[in-house]
Amino acid sequence: MSTAYQIVVCAGIVPDPLQTLEPVASPTGPALKNEMMLPAVLDPWASHALYEAANLAKNAPGSKVWLVSLGPKAKLQQVMMTVAQRVPFELVALDGPASGFTEAAEVAAALAEVIQTIPGLDRSRLLVFGGWESASRGAGATMQMVGERLGIVDQFQGVDELKVNPDGSLDILERIEGGKHQVSKCVGPPALLGWATGNLPEPKNNPQVGMTNMRAVMPALQKAKAVKLAGEGLTFASVTLPKQMRETKVVKDKLPDEIAAEIVEWIKK
Amino acid sequence: MIEPGFQTDAPTIERPRMDADIVCVGFGPATAGFLTTLSKQLTNADGTPVVESAVMPGLPPQVLCYERADDIGFGVSGVVTKARALRESFPELDKADIPMAAPVSVEKVLYLLDPIGASRRSTLLKLADEMIQAFKWALPVEDHALKLPWTPDFLHKHGGMVLSMGQFMQWVGAQVQSTGTVQIWPGTPVKEALLENCVTSASNSVAADVSPLYLNSGKPEPTHVGCYKPRVVGVRLLDQGVTKSGAPADGFSPGMDIHAALTVVGDGPVGPVGQQLDELFGLPPDHHTRDWAVGMKFVVDLPADTPLKPGTVLHTFGYPEPEIFGFLYVHPDRVASLGIFVPSWFDSPVRTTYRYLQHWMLHPYLWRYLKGGKLRSWGAKTLGESGRRGEPHLVGDGYARIGEGSGSTNVLTGSGVDEAWATGAQLAEAVLELLKARKPFTKENLEATYVQRRRASWVESEARVAEQSRDGFQRGVVTGMVGMALAGLSGGRLAIPGKPLRPWERIPSLEDYFRGRIPPDEVRAIRDDCYARGVSAHAALMERAGWPTIPYDGQLLVSHQDALLLGGKVQAPPGYADHVVFLYPELCQKCGTKLCVEVCSGQAITPGENGVPNFDREKCVHCGACLWNCASASPENPERMAVAFRAGTGGLHSAEN
């Protein structure tokens, strides 16, 4: 492997999945109740993309990872306290909404614009990573539009694996229907990959990585460009959470068959 | 002997090392005060450093803070505070900037009568209750609650604020981080302090393995085997990728050693580093940490038609048991923080905070406000309630202690956040003085700067007034209340004496506790049946003793597990060792009360095989109640019990507490 990649990871932030979400109507459209009070995390789909990017960069000497993120600056700062300990990257921050009620095309335009301003970007080495989906919206369209705006025609969505061949070509496994993968061969960068879950575990916290990252994170946040998403042409007919009924029971050391039977009985009720 | 289950490092483990100038343990109010004060003064207006880092010349001092919880603001508590120290740090403080903050508007203290008849009341209290009922036409009695017509000024929080500490800490964290001069790293527990001048079993050089220090634990003098004038030189982070017992497993990543000239210990009353230093250096003569309380709270969306105004502060006592204190603070937008404190002097072997909290909410005076409300968040923590009497050695070579774990909580006024913040700010000023004078962080220099500032401050003078104020509770609730009034009104000159017992000395057996209410044979049968089913016994015993079942509504009255999941959002990342360890299984087997099971705030400790409890790390909220709630004394140290509460990860995932 001889290519030194430039990997740009697009990653939004979402409320910590453990939180209870409640949509409310605000003067500017739908919103989540108390969103600024909810703890935020890096979008889990994009997190996989970041870990894959860091792993690729580690195995391809000379590579570099940028993390491009659009969100409220204060929330981005909070999320970086956790993410920045995981893998090395340089943050490129955009200060704007990240509520999940934004227009994917506008978000894509803002991301593509700021990516083009990264100094020294070389298309022959450029890989753009992101989440195939998003935990806040699931439109699955943003990354595709980022690629289109950057003029990247080799795009792969639902990626679970990326392998670099000795000749520099890329073997990419994409999820397709029926629980199967489609294997594609790409001659090389530039390419855009919308990651599904990948195969890597969450990296351990590394204080040295954190200390190095954070020296660049704070300046990046301080110069984050404000982005206003107009939401033109976007209307929400209705916003609801999935109806849910819950009943908690904590059991351990029970056979799977017994648990399954109990769940079936509960559903029947 | 070395603690059973204590994991000594194999000599072959190579640990990564990083160097900083100052490392802080825990991001609570005290460390927030420290970092707020320090971070504002590390650079000049032109961005140049006021003093240079010793480890990175040319840059400001490198200041790192490691926090156990998965984010800052997780796992702390809602408070009402006079906010004197906070305002000193933020003179332009605008409450509108801090979510859930409200100025104090109404204060009431209520004595709650027992509307059920299940409460364990003394004859004196029963007589008082009958008098109140007889004269309720002339007294401010409403819905089985007597509003005290007068309360002493020291209990008031005039001009103060109601805060969600979670939201406040997130706000402070953002302020501090945005200076760019300090770094706060949540989700990164500190395992222990690194010690110099200690010899380990594996090495004869600088030692971080503290196991020899426990050899003489409990002795009053710091003459521990293996150490000579020990000096703290930093901290070791927790190992990742290990089994439940701490053995290396897949993805093993040894905890990094962070070396620093100064270690700031602000890890609270159950923090691992504070415990380690207490073991190593002992406490000053006549000091102890025998008094504690378990605090548990709900954050609730009040009904749409609530009459409670933001800033309302209600404090209660008398119910569900006379020893249990309650609070209800109203935030803006119809949100309230409410909960109870179960103190160490409530001598019940089934002192479950969660169940009592539900009975407290259902008291007619409170339920009229809460009916129709909805649980938003839930949490629990223990509070060190020994106050100044629990103060450890505040400084030593290479370290300083601040906040609750340093004995700063005022047990008379029931105030802790403001005092903790103040001690952090005082240490920051001292550190800046020493840095500018290029003096090392020796015990003597820290004494002359930090300790001197603390002793000269209101924190100290008010703590001295409070020092003996609660001793009367050792003789009963009424005596305790009188003692508090005496101490508060006399400026600490008068108090009702009482000697706090060690926690394990005051736990009666289940049979004795329920004597006269439930026959001993039946108590044992209920206990044995519950433990055979792997559940705690308090619900069955309390209901047999007259407490009604809780009418779950799925909104506010929910099961304990639902409170964990819906309110606390409790979870723990994989790959870490169990942080609650039963040190002496043979003592657990003999133990008839299993108080650790009954009191556990997260139902993380359950009855186990052969009498040794099980611990489920994924449910632990890190309140630390198990550290104090054990009926068996440690054979090594009579001030400690048979449960170890070590560094661990995970816990609450709510920032509204």
Image (spheres, helix red, strand yellow):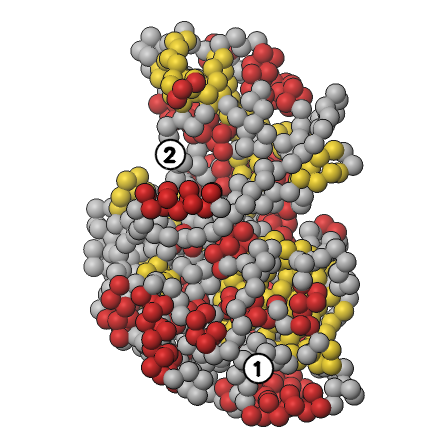
What chain letter is assigned to the residue under label 1? B
- Residue A164 quadrant: top left
- The 10 Å Cα crowd at callout 1, few under 14, some 14 to 19, many 20 or more, is few
The label number, if any, that marks residue B358 in the structure image: none
Looking at the image, which is closer to me, B147 or A97? B147
Q: Would you place residue B641 above or below residue B520 in this image? A: above
Which residue is rendered at x = 62% and y = 20% of the image?
A: A108
Marks 2/1: CA–CA distance? 55 Å
Q: Secondary structure at mark 2?
A: loop
Which residue is rendered at x = 37% and y = 44% of the image?
A: A261
Q: Would you place residue A8 above or below residue B425 in this image? A: above
Q: Position of residue B632 (x, y in %)?
A: 32, 76
Whether label 2 touches label 1, CB < 8 Å: no
> Does residue A15 appear in this view?
yes
Q: Secondary structure at mark 1?
A: loop
What chain letter is assigned to the residue under label 2? A
Answer with left or right where residue A35 lies relative to residue B514: right
Amino acid type for the residue under numbered disc 2: Pro
Amino acid type for the residue under numbered disc 1: Gly
> In which quadrant is the N terminus of chain B drawn?
bottom left
Q: Which residue is mark 1?
A: B117
Q: Would you place residue B442 above or below residue B97 in this image? A: below
> In which quadrant is the C terminus of chain B drawn?
bottom right
The label number, if any, that marks residue A201 in the structure image: 2
